[in-house]
Amino acid sequence: MKTNLVFSPRYKTPLSDFGFDKPFALDRGEMVLKRLSEDIGAPVPYLEPQPITDEQLRLVHTPDYLETLKIPKTWIDLFEFRESEYFPEKAIRPLPTIIDDFKLKSGGTLTACEISLETGLAANLGGGYHHAFPDQGRGYCAINDIAIAIRHLQKIGKIKKAMIVDLDFHQGDGNAVTFQSDDSVFTFSVHSEEGWPEIKQKSDLDIPIKEIEKEKYLEKTEAGLKLSLSKFAPDMVIYVGGSDPYEKDVLPGTSFFRLPLSVMKARDELVIDTFADLGISFASVFAGGYGPDVWEVHYLSTRRLLERSGFSFGKTYSCC
């Protein structure tokens, strides 16, 4: 089996290590690997990434912003923690060292992109920090792994043009801002019109969907893909496959936009198959998704990616 999955057990970041008494994102990658292994009756291989470097961070983020990441308050504000949830005396790691966890997962995105350029398809079982701007973090996203991967690969001459397909519930505003005046990167976002962020940025193609239009989600997504590809021919695409539109997502802000698993499965198959059929290098990242069941979306998506990479599962599914 090809090793086109990127993951590390160190992706799991217990916030209690930093003195926070609050659960956050569960490790969806761990669950995906567990279920895939059950499907085939053997461990699924993956490649462990190296963290991105400070030099690579500076390809996207401003020096002044990176300095603020050394201050605990920056992280408290980023994660929207209350004072009653923070107990620094219980911490076993200084809060600013959480940047190391972000750098590792961001290294996973870069590694997945590099693999995709060799094998065609790859997935980072994590990452997807699409809300981070060059000069600030937002929406739990401290650094923008997607933008960093693209900038690094452009710098070393591996790619010239990249496309970002973002189907997270929330607009990929960080990427929209980062690449707004850059003709070498095409940003395409399908997102909730009513959802956060309240002030949307301008992507190359935005398809905001209202709650009353969610039955047209797949139709609008397919039309957007066709239009994007008619306007732009990428060397590589990064797919931001957030699971937060899923009906089992527990984030209160997504409660009005609940799509069944069948639609989420069809969405991911549409995107993966489109680029696989065209032979365009394709790397996916997890992005948003909250609660104990959203891993189901990523499991089905990752399984499809492996099937299109030539791996046969038969008809056995361990869930869904």
Image (cartoon, grey):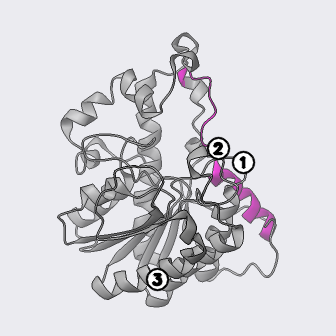
Q: Which mark is residue 26?
A: 2
Q: Look at discs 1 and 3 and give the one toward the viewer.
A: 1
Q: Are marks 1 and 3 in contact (CB under 8 Å)?
A: no
Q: How many numbered markers are drawn?
A: 3
Which amino acid does the dot numbered 1 rest on? Pro
Residue 298: name its quadrant: bottom right
Q: Secondary structure at mark 1?
A: loop
* Front in this rendered view, residue 211 or 169: 211
Whether residue 68 is visible? yes
Which amino acid does the dot numbered 3 rest on? Phe
Q: Work out whether mark 1 precedes mark 2 in sequence or the reverse, and give the earlier one.
A: 2
Q: For mark 3, what is the residue?
A: 275
Q: Residue at x 42, y 34 (%)?
A: 78
* Front in this rendered view, residue 229 or 113: 229
Residue span colored magenta? 18-39
How far across and how far down the image is residue 10, in percent? 57, 42
* Front in this rendered view, residue 245 or 193: 193
How far across and how far down the image is residue 249, in percent? 65, 52
* Label 2 crowd (10 A; few <14 / some 14-19 / many >=20): some
Vertical placement of residue 308 versus 240, above or below: below
Q: Are marks 1 and 2 in contact (CB under 8 Å)?
A: yes
Q: Which mark is residue 292?
A: 1
Residue 150: name its quadrant: bottom left
Vertical placement of residue 269 versus 171, above or below: below
